[in-house]
Image (spheres, helix red, strand yellow):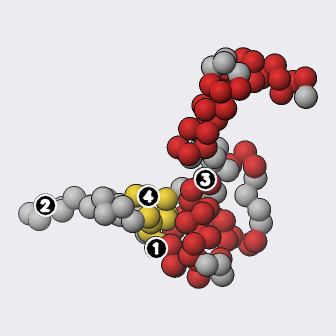
Amino acid sequence: MMTKKPEEPQQPTLYTPSEVANFFRVDPKTVTRWARTGTLNPVMLPSGHRRYHADEIHRLLNAGTPVPADELPEPEPSLRARSLLHSVIRDYFDGDPAAVVRFLRTS
């Protein structure tokens, strides 16, 4: 009697930044920028290189239809942006984030 060999889980297809750039007909640096701004969700390899899930790329390319806003990932501020924001709050609002909100509501 033959025993069935368990199926190995299928690995997702991942694209390099250059491959993604070719799909969208943009410069690879644009793909990197999209990753930094949260437009694309890269997988970071242990080597530090980015790869992109094929299903996400194909979904974005599919029929040229825009991705609904509620399906887009929330952009996460960069460390530099956070640092700048914290220094503005510290220097101009005496470290009080609520003062920033009050200021923005009255502006």
CA gap, disc 4 and disc 1? 10 Å
The amino acid type of the residue labelled 4 equals Val
Pick whichever of labels 1 and 2 is earlier in the sequence: 2
The residue at which mark 3 appears reads as 38
CA gap, disc 3 and disc 4? 12 Å
Secondary element at tag 1: loop
**Above or below 97: residue 21:** below
Pick whichever of labels 3 and 1 is earlier in the sequence: 1
The residue at which mark 4 appears reads as 43
Taking the image as shown, residue 30 lies to the left or right of residue 53, namely: right
The residue at which mark 2 appears reads as 3
Taking the image as shown, residue 70 lies to the left or right of residue 53, namely: right
CA gap, disc 2 and disc 3? 46 Å
Residue 99: name its quadrant.
top right
Q: Residue furthest front?
A: 91
Question: Dot 3: few (<14), some (14–19), or many (≥20) neighbours within 10 Å?
Answer: some
CA gap, disc 4 and disc 2? 36 Å
